[in-house]
Image (cartoon, rainbow, N blue to C red):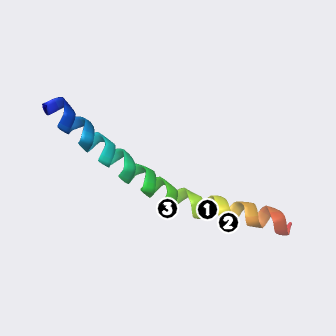
Amino acid sequence: MVLLSYFKNYNKILKIIQTQFLYYFYPKYYFYTSNLKTI
């Protein structure tokens, strides 16, 4: 049971990290690609 709850928490943390990653890196990536297109 403890392992199961740990796994659920791990999944939650992983999702939070994923969303943070997307919010942080995706705009930069988008900005970079749009700059490449204009050049």
Q: What is the three-letter code of the residue carrying label 1?
A: Lys
Give the residue at mark 2: 31
The label on residue 17 is none
Which label sits in the foreground, 3 or 1?
3
Q: Quadrant of residue 9?
A: top left
Q: Position of residue 33 (x, y in %)?
A: 74, 60
Indicate the position of residue 26 as horizontal and vertical percent values: 58, 59
Question: In front here: 10 or 30?
Answer: 10
Disc 1 element: helix
Residue under numbered circle 3 = 23
Q: Position of residue 36 (x, y in %)?
A: 80, 62
Residue for point 31% across, 48% down? 12
The image quadrant where one finds the N terminus is: top left
- Looking at the image, residue 24 sits to the left or right of residue 31; the answer is left
Give the percent coordinates (x, y) of residue 25: 55, 57
| Residue, disc 1 | 28
9 relative to 35 in the view: left or right: left
* Residue at the extreme left of the image, as rendered: 1
Q: Residue pushed farthest bottom?
A: 38
